[in-house]
């Protein structure tokens, strides 16, 4: 018996076309549904960056100074003209080393000096040592970003945004960094409206937070600070400022021994709503005066603070200060040369205590209610910088601005879960 092998029947033409189309379209559809991540190198760079910011490419404009500094003028112009979306700059743990430049560049590009490839990004360091340190950090195996870090990476890929870590807070604020303990890590989305830079975002009190994104809020429009005010910070609890400072047992011991501020009145102060103001002083040895206004809810709370003020009076007298009564209800303290250095007064008709450093305040400015936010900061950075009262490490764009507004709403209270949603604006006129 002979076996006859028949040629398989050729499928009808429509079926052939459908099969071919499927082989082409299915992979294309998968690529559209799961595209290759743009700027994938940001995931690896984020843990090594104290501050990382994205910028839009301004076609038709010359390349930024950082490009010319890191790439040289000719290469900067050539690569700048080929960019279409975003570029990035960041600072490492040692901010004084200068900024890194990160951009998209073809793999065929001869590597510029002090550069290295991080996935699909070309990163140019400020100097050979900074490049070596970054390369060593990138060799450490890390988990992919999650939670807050992942949301920050996504924002840095999509538009203008900025991410910071505790290292950036320490570099920019210096000895004032403990006051911003609740904002150790965060990111903001940035947008411009004329001469005003606006932002919306989130922050957390701990690195590596995996909590869900807190709900955003719409900030209430506020009038700018008057010329006779430099700073106003209002919050629902003074613990916003004290938490970081009181983490030092040595400081708590000093407050108790030197100023009579024991655990009882300290706990009360931590939970008290407050307004902190800084204003210019035009005459005398001080450049600025400070006012701290405490808003008490119960008469019993006033009794606690009056007992503490009595202990404080004794402590100040033992330190050589003389007590004055320059106006009704005001208790002030002066040095041997007669210069008033501070004091306090109970505001008439209200359960409010006004503590002050510097000259005796002549007026108490009105302040708008907080509304839905937990705290609000209004600041005149340019005026304070001219008086030498701002940390010099703050970004130049902040130091040169006329007004700054920043509001926060705290979303958590347990340790390690202190999240804040943030909104604000910067007047660049």
Image (cartoon, rainbow, N blue to C red):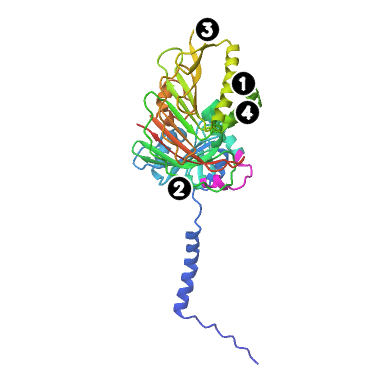
Residue pointed to by mark 1: 260
Q: Residue at x 57, y 16 (%)?
A: 313
Residue pointed to by mark 3: 336
Residue pointed to by mark 2: 158
Numbered disc in front, either 1 or 3:
1
Q: CA distance from mark 4 to mark 1?
A: 11 Å
Q: Residues within 10 Å of mark 2 (few under 14, many from 20)?
A: some
Q: CA distance from mark 3 to mark 4?
A: 32 Å
Position of the N terminus, as image quadrant, is: bottom right
Count of picture labels? 4
Sequence-wise, which precedes: disc 2 or disc 1?
2
Q: How far across and how far down the image is residue 282, in percent?
A: 40, 16
Residue pointed to by mark 4: 264
Query: Which is more toward the observer, 375 or 426?
Result: 375
**Res. 96 visible in picture:** no
Q: Is residue 378 magenta?
A: no
Query: Which is more toward the observer, 67 or 186?
Result: 186
């Amino acid at each position: 018996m002979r076996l006859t092998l028949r040629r398989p029947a050729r499928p009808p033409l429509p079926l052939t076309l459908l099969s071919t189309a499927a082989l082409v379209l299915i992979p294309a559809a998968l690529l559209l549904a799961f595209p290759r991540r743009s700027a994938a190198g940001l995931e690896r760079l984020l843990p090594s960056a104290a501050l990382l910011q994205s910028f839009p490419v301004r076609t038709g404009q010359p390349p930024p100074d950082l490009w010319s500094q890191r790439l040289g003028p000719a290469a900067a112009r050539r690569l700048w003209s080929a960019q279409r979306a975003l570029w990035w700059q960041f600072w490492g743990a040692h901010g004084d080393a200068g900024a890194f430049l990160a951009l998209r560049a073809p793999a065929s590009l001869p590597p510029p000096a002090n550069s290295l490839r991080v996935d699909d990004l070309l990163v140019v360091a400020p100097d050979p040592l900074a490049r070596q340190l970054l390369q060593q950090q990138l060799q450490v195996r890390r988990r992919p970003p999650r939670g807050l870090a992942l949301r920050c990476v996504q924002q840095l890929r999509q538009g203008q945004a900025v991410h910071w870590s505790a290292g950036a807070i320490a570099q920019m604020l210096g000895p004032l960094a403990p006051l911003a303990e609740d904002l150790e890590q965060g990111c903001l989305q940035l947008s411009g409206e004329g001469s005003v830079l606006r932002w919306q975002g989130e922050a957390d009190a701990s690195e590596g937070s995996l909590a869900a994104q807190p709900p955003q809020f719409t900030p209430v429009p506020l009038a700018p600070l008057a010329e006779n005010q430099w700073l106003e910070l209002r919050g629902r609890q003074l613990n916003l400022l004290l938490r970081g400072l009181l983490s030092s047992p040595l400081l708590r011991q000093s407050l108790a021994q030197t100023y009579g501020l024991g655990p009882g009145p300290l706990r009360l102060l931590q939970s008290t709503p407050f307004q902190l103001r800084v204003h210019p002083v035009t005459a005398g040895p001080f450049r600025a005066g400070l006012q701290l206004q405490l808003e008490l809810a119960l008469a019993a709370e006033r009794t606690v603070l009056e007992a503490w003020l009595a202990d404080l009076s004794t402590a100040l007298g033992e330190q050589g200060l003389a007590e004055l009564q320059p106006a009704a209800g005001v208790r002030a303290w002066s040095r041997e040369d007669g210069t008033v250095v501070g004091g306090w007064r109970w505001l008439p008709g209200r359960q409010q205590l006004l503590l002050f450093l510097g000259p005796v305040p002549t007026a108490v400015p009105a302040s708008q209610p907080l509304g839905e936010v937990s705290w609000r900061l209004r600041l005149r950075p340019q005026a304070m910088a001219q008086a030498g009262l701002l940390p010099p490490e703050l970004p130049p764009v902040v130091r040169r601005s006329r007004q700054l507004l920043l509001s926060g709403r705290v979303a958590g209270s347990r340790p390690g879960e202190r999240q804040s949603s943030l909104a604000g604006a910067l007047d660049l006129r």
